[in-house]
Amino acid sequence: MVNKRSVLTPALIALVGFLTVCPVVMLIFGSFSTGLGAFGEFTLDKYIQGYTDPELGGIILNTIIFVLGSSFVATGLALLLAYLNTRTDIPFKFMFRIISIIPMMIPHILFSVSWVLLLNPSNGLINLFLRQIPGLENLAINIYSLPGMILVEGLLDLPIAYLILAPAMASFDISLEESSKVCGGSTLRTLFRVTLPVLRPAILAAFILSLVRSLASFAVPSVIGMPGRIYVLATHIYQSIATGFAADFGKAAAIGMSVLATSITLIYVYRYLTSESEKYVTISSRGYRPSVIELKGARYPMFGLVGILSMILIVLPVLVLLYTSMVPYSMIPSAKAFSMMSWKHWIEVINDPISLLSLKNSVFLGVFGATLGVTLSIFVAYVIVKVRSHASGLLESLSFLSFSFPGIVIGVGFMWFFVRTPLYATIWTLLIGYIATYLPYGVRPLTSAFVQVHSHLEESSQVCGAGPFTTMRRIVIPLLIPGIVSGWILMATMFVRELTLSVVLSRPGTEVLAVQIFRFAEDGLWGQLSALGIMMIIISTALVLLATLVGMKFKPVEE
Amino acid sequence: MKRLLIVFLALIIVPSAFAADSDLVQKAKAEGQVSFYANMTAIAPIMDVFNAQTGLAGKYTRISTSKFLATVLTEYQAGKLMADVLQAPLPVMQMLKAKGVLAPYTSASAADYPAWTRQDDQIQTFGIEYVGLIYNKELVKAADAPKRYEDLTDPRWKNKIVMANPASHATTISWLVGLKENVFKSEDKWMEFLKGLAANRPMLVKSFGPTPAPVESGEKHIAISMPKYIITKAPAPLDWARLEQPLMGTPRGIAISSSAKNPNAAKLFMDFWLTKKAMAKLSAEVGEYVLAPGVFPPIDGMDKAKVIPIRTLSEKEISSYGTMFKKIFKLH
Amino acid sequence: MEIKITNLSKYYYSGGKTIKALDNVSLSIPANRIFTLLGPSGCGKTTLLRCIVGLEAPDTGEIKIGEDTVLSTEENIFVPTENRGLGMVFQTYAIWPHMDVFNNVAYPLQTRKVPKDVIRSKVEKTLRFVQLEGFEDRPATKLSGGQQQRVALARALVAEPKVILFDEPLSNLDAKLREETRKDLRIFLTELQITAIYVTHDRIEALSLSDIVAVMNGGQIVEMGEPRDIYLNSNHRFVADFIGRTNLIEAKVTAQEESVTKVDCAIGSFACRKRADLNPGDNVTLCLRPEFIRLKRGGASEAQNVFNGQIESLVFIGEAFEGEIKIRESQIFIKTEPDSDIRVGDSANFAVDPDHCLLVIR
Ligand SMILES: Nc1ncnc2c1ncn2[C@@H]1O[C@H](COP(=O)(O)OP(=O)(O)O)[C@@H](O)[C@H]1O
Ligand SMILES: [Mg+2]
C-alpha cells in the first residue's frame, strides 16, 4: 500500500499539473511578451502598466468587500439550508435541496439580468410592488450597488457552499452532539459549541471556494457592477484589455497573476487552518445516521420563513426568466404583456440547428465530463486527505490553479496551449479544459467526504486481503457516495452552462449551450436567451435528479 | 421545413443569381468546403443559401470582436488557422493585414460598391456597424426625440440614457471621436457635448448587446445603440431618432486568408457574400447597413439617412481617448 | 506461525521533532501462542502492530512471518498488507457501516475469490463460533459494541489467517463485558491453535489472556516472558511497576550472602532474593508487592525482614483490606485478608519472605 501510494501521488501531480499548469504557463509567457501572443520578446511593460494604475487601490477595496460579502452570504445561507435540511424535521425537504442548487444551473448572466429586472431603481418589479405600500412611494432599492452585487453573487455561489456542507452535516457523528446535550448544553449551545466547530473544515472549504469563485466571477460585476460604476478586479481586467480592438490578454494575465496569487494564498491559509482539524473523523463505524431535531411548533413557521426567503431569492428570478422567454421583448408585466405572450422564442430556438447541436454537445460534456472529472477527483482527494504530505499540498494547489484565474483570461491560456496540440478545435479540448478548470468542484466535496471516512475502515479491508483498487471500489467509494453525487452534480451542471472556456475553444461542430446563450446575449436577444436558459435548467435538473437517484440506489446504507 | 423551402427556392434561382466563372466553381467544388470566421451574428440563413446554391459545405464560426484578433493570430502563428474567409471590423482586418494573415483578392461582385470600400487589394468593406439613437416610442413622442446629437445633453434625459462604456467599448470610443471629426464644428462644442452627456448620468453597460433591453422595458428611455435592433427586436416599441446630422459607424471588412486551405472556395464564398442578393438578405434579416448600392435595411427612413464610416483609430488613440472619456464621465 | 522481527525502527517527524515510535526492536513471537504487547499509551504498540500487518513502512528492519520475509529494508522487500494473509481486529472495530453483518464477515473470503457456497458456509460457521448466528442480515450500524467486536473478530478469523492481530479490542467495552469477552477470547484462540498478537495497556488483560507477554516502553521491548514469570521475577523496575501494584524502595547493596543479597534502605536492612550480578555498594530498587506482606499486630521485633510500624489507612474492598503502613518516614502499601482484625492506628509488624523481596535495576 505504501508503495502504491507513493506512485499515485507523483502520477496525479504530473497529470493534474499538466492539465492546469500548461494554460497558466502560457499566460505567464504572454504576460511577459510583447505583442498579443504567448511568445514574443521579453518585456515587463504589461506588469508596469497593470500595477501602476492609480485606480487599483479603490478597485482592490471594492473587490475585497464584494468577495468577502458574497462568500458570507453564500456560506451563511448554505449553512442554514443544509442544517434545516439534514438535521431537522422541516417539511418538504426535497424542495430545499432543489432550491439550493438551482443557481448552479442558471447561466450567471441570466441570473444577474433577472435580478436587474427585479430590482433596478427605475422600474424593477420589486420596487414597483413596494411603491404601492403607503409611505414607500419614493422607494428605489438599487441593485446597481455593492450590496446588490454581493447579494446576487452570494446566491450564485450558494450551491457550491451547500453541496460541500450538506454531505458533511448529513454524516455528522451524532454522539458528539449527544454528549454536549448530556453535559447540559442547549440545542443552540450545542450548535455553536459543538456542531459548527466540528464542521469547521467543511465550512471553511465552502467559504474559501466561494471566495475564489467570486474573485474570478465576471457576470455579476459586468451586468450589475458596471452600470453602477462599481469596478472590481474582474471588470478592471476586462476594461484594461477591451479598450481597443486588439485585446491584450497578456496584460490581462499580468493583472490576473495577483488574483491567482491571492487565491493560492487563500488555499494555503485554508490548509493551514484545517491541517489539524481535518483529522476530525466524523463517520465512525458505530453507525452514522444523524438524529433529527424536532422543530415542534416552529416547524411550519420555520418552513414558511425559509420558503418565502428562497421564493424571493431563487424562484422569482427563474420565473422572471420564464416570463422573459415568452414576451416578445423586455417589458414590464402588464395586461398587455400577458396578452402578447407566445412560444415564439422557444420555437426559434428549437428550430435552430446549431442550438440543437449545442444541446447535444453540452449534454455529452456534462455527463461524460463530470463522470471523468469525478473519477479523477476521487484520486486527487484521496491523496490530499489520506496521504497529506507536502506533495499532496502541492497537488491541492495545482487543482485550484486554472480555477483561480479570472475566467476571461484562462480561456485564452487554454487556446494558446491547445493550438499546439492535435486536439485543437475538437470537443476534447472542451472536455479537458472543463475538467482542468473546474477540478475543485469535484475535489472539494470529495475531500470533505474522505475526511469523514476513518482510515481503519480502509485499512481493515487491506488486512482482509483487498488491494487498493478493491478497497476503493468496495469500501471507500460506497462510503463516499454523498460526496461523489455532490461532485458530479457540481461538475455536470457547471459543464452544461460553461461559458468562459467554451467561448474561446468552441468551433463549428463543437458548439455548446453557453456559447449559443452568449451569442444571444451579444445580440441582446433576451427572449431566445431565456428560452435556451430554461432548457438548460431543465437539462440540469434532469441530470441532478439522475445523479440523486443513482446515488440513492448505490448507497447501500440500510435503514 | 423552412430550410427545405430555402434550398428548393435556391436551386431554382441558382443560374440567374450569381454568375461566377465556371472554372472557379469547379475548383471550389473539388475543395468541397469553406470555413468562415465572422464577428457578425445571425448569418446562418445566408450560409444556408450559399450551401444550397453551390453544394459546398460552408461553416461559420462566430468569434466576438474582443477575442477575434487573439484567436486568429494564435491560430495563424501556430499554423492552424482554420478560416478561409475572415470578416471583422475594419480596424481588426487592418491589423490582420499587417500581420500577413490576409491574401489579395478583388471580387467582381463588389465592382459597383463605392470606391472608398476598396482601399487596398485585400480588404473589401461591405457594411457599416452604424450607431444611432434608439428610443422607446411608447415613452417618448417622435416629436420629442432628439433632432441633433446635442439634444442628448438636455437635462430632460437625465438618468434616462443607456450606452456602452465610453472608457472601454472601442466602437463607442471611435464613435465619439467620429462625432468630433465629422459632426461638431469645433473641439469646444464637442467637449461641451461630452460634458453635457456625462452630466445626464447615462447607465453604462459592457457593449451594445445589453443597450436595447432597458429601453424596451422602459427602465431607460433612450440608448446610444444600433438601429438594427429595431428589426431584430421587433415588435419591441423601438424607433430611431432621425437626426439632421449623419449617422456614423465602424466599417465591416471581409477578406481571404493567406493560409486558406480552400482558396478557391474562399473566393467563391466572397463573391457570393458581396452579391446584392446576399447583402439584401443580410440587410433584411438582421437590419445591417450594407454598401451594395441601392440596398437598405427595412427601417423606416433609413434609405434617406446619411451613414458615414469612421476613420480607423490606432490602438494608442483608442486607449488615450478611452482614458479621457473615463475622466469626463467620472468613472471609478 | 512464528514471527521474527529484527532491528525494526520507525520514526515519525512531526513539528520538527523526531519521534522514535519504534527504536530498534528485535523480537521473536512463537507460533500458535497468544502473545501480548503490554505498555503504557504512546509506547509504540500500535505502531509495531501496524508494521507487522504492513500498514506502516518502517525505516529499518526486517520482519519474517514463518518462512516469508514480508519486510526487509535492506533487501528492499515490502509485501503489501493485502498479500500478507493476516487477520486483524481494530480498536474501533472498523465495521463497514454500509454493509450488513454477512458482507462484513464474507469480505476477506470474497477478496480471496472463494466460491459463493463455500463463503456462505464458512461465514455461517464463523458467526456460530462467535455466537452471532442469525445476525447475517443485520445492518452493521444496528449492533451493540459487543456484537460489533464479535463481528470484527469473525471477520478476522473467517479466512483462517496464519496470524491474527488485535489492537486493544476490548477498550471500548464496559467492564463486565470486557471480562467475559476476555475469557471467551482466550478459549477461542486456544481452541483455534493460531498465532495471536494482542496489544493492550491493561495489565490484567495481558496477564490473564496471554501465553507470553512483552512489556514495551519508549519504543523498545523491555522484557518478555510468561505472565507469571514476568510478574514474579522481573528484572526491571519499569516492568515490576507497570505490571502490578508494588512498593518501590531505593536501596543499596550491603553484602552478598550465600542464599540472599542484603540491602539497606530507609526502612532498614532487608534480606532479598539472591542476585549474583550485584556488588556491594550498587544502587538498586527493592520491590515489595503488597500481597506478599504479612501483617501481625504487636511490638517491635528483631527477626529478619520484620519491621514495626503504624497502620495509617485501611480500606475494605471486599476481597481484601488495602491500606498503608508507616515505618519510620516511609509509607508502604499493604494488603491483608478480609477477616483481619487489624485497624487504623494499630501498631503492627510486617514481614516479607526474602524470596519475595525482589531487587530490580533502574
Ligand atoms: N502518524 C503519526 N505521526 C506522528 N507521530 C505518531 C503517528 N502515529 C503515532 N505517532 C507517535 O508514535 C508514538 C507511538 O504511537 P502508538 O504506536 O500509537 O502508541 P500506542 O502504544 O499507544 O499504540 C506516539 O508517541 C505517537 O504520538
Ligand atoms: Mg494504540
Image (cartoon, rainbow, N blue to C red):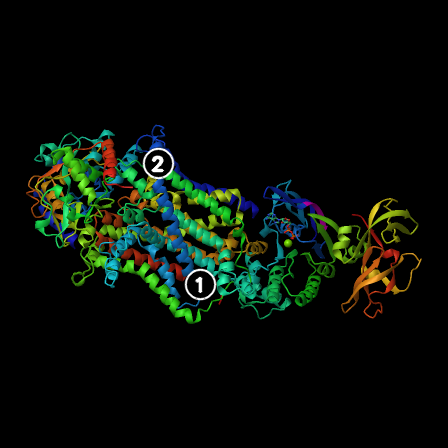
Q: Which mark is residue A420?
A: 2
- Magenta: main secondary structure equals strand
Question: Is C314 placed above or below A197 here?
Answer: below
Q: Mark 1 near mark 2, Cβ–Cβ under 8 Å?
A: no
Q: Are marks 1 and 2 on the same chain?
A: yes
**Amino acid type for the residue under numbered disc 2:** Arg
Q: Is residue C169 visible?
A: yes
How far from the left and from the top, in percent, is residue B276?
9, 41
Looking at the rendering, the stretch of residues picked out in magenta corresponds to: C23-28
Task: Indicate yes or no whether the magenta region holds residue A274.
Answer: no
Q: Which mark is residue A86?
A: 1
Give the residue furthest to the front: A135
How far from the left and from the top, in percent, is residue A195?
50, 59
Q: Which mark is residue A56?
A: none
Asked whether C341 or C318 is in front, the reply is: C341
Q: Which of the 4 quarters of the picture holds residue B32? A: top left
Question: Is C139 placed above or below B115 here?
Answer: below
- The reply to whether the residue tagged 2 has its Cβ within 8 angstroms of ligand 1 is no
**Amino acid type for the residue under numbered disc 1:** Thr
> Left of C335 or right of it: where is A498?
left
Q: Secondary structure at mark 1?
A: helix
Q: CA distance from mark 1 to mark 2?
A: 48 Å
- The reply to whether the residue tagged 1 has its Cβ within 8 angstroms of ligand 1 is no
- What's the residue at 20%, 34% (across, down)? B91
Q: Which of the 4 quarters of the picture holds residue A318? A: bottom left
Chain to which the residue tagged by mark 2 belongs: A
